[in-house]
Amino acid sequence: MKAYKITERKNFMGRLLGSSVFDSFLLAEASITTYNTFLIDGRINKGFFTGDLNDEALPPYEFSRWQDMRSLCFDLIKGKRTPVGFKFVLHLKPELAESLLTENGSAVTLNDLKAFVLNIKYDGNDLTCVTATAFHTFIPDKMPDQIWDGYMDQFMGNNGIGYEP
């Protein structure tokens, strides 16, 4: 687990809500507090898609793709006033998580790993990102945590996101 205090909020928010930088993630949940508190459960409701003749209409993931939810979240945040706060829980897409584990020689597989998680939180003053690794069961191996933290260090640097550790 690693925490990043974002030093350039406007730059970060532009990348999060106004570009494809975070499109390798799925939205597990969101809470946005402005004039109301808006809660989004990112879990796909597969029942909504029953009866479709085209199997391609069924989303391939458990959670909504960030790229599909980004504009909705932007619409809830934009305006003349800064939000009171927000929280986004993002999961790296499973195929990318599997690739990270394989490329780094981890003995942990996608069957063991529930998700590489990125928690993004704004409390009215500070904007922070915190990494986490979720497993289906207890795993004493800390290599996935190190892989994920290293990936996020590189992700932040490659995308021009300024932060303090």
Image (cartoon, rainbow, N blue to C red):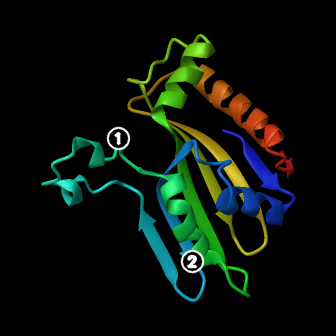
Image check: 101 left or right of 10?
left
Say above or below: 140 vs 160.
above
User: How far across and how far down the image is residue 64, in percent?
Assistant: 42, 53
Q: Image quarter for residue 19? A: bottom right
How many other residues sit within 10 Å of disc 2, few (<14), some (14-19) or many (≥20)? some
Q: CA distance from mark 2 to mark 1?
A: 26 Å
**Residue under numbered circle 2:** 76
Q: Are marks 2 and 1 in contact (CB under 8 Å)?
A: no
Q: Image quarter for residue 83? A: bottom right
Quarter of the figure with the N terminus: top right
Q: Secondary structure at mark 2?
A: helix
Mark 1 residue type:
Pro
Looking at the image, which residue sits at the far front?
54
- Residue drawn at x 48%, y 29% as measured from the top left: 95
How many other residues sit within 10 Å of disc 1, few (<14), some (14-19) or many (≥20)? few
In primary-sequence order, the first of circles 2 and 1 is: 1
Mark number, residue 98 = none
**Residue under numbered circle 1:** 60
- Residue drawn at x 78%, y 42% as measured from the top left: 156
Quarter of the figure with the C terminus: top right
Mark 2 residue type:
Leu
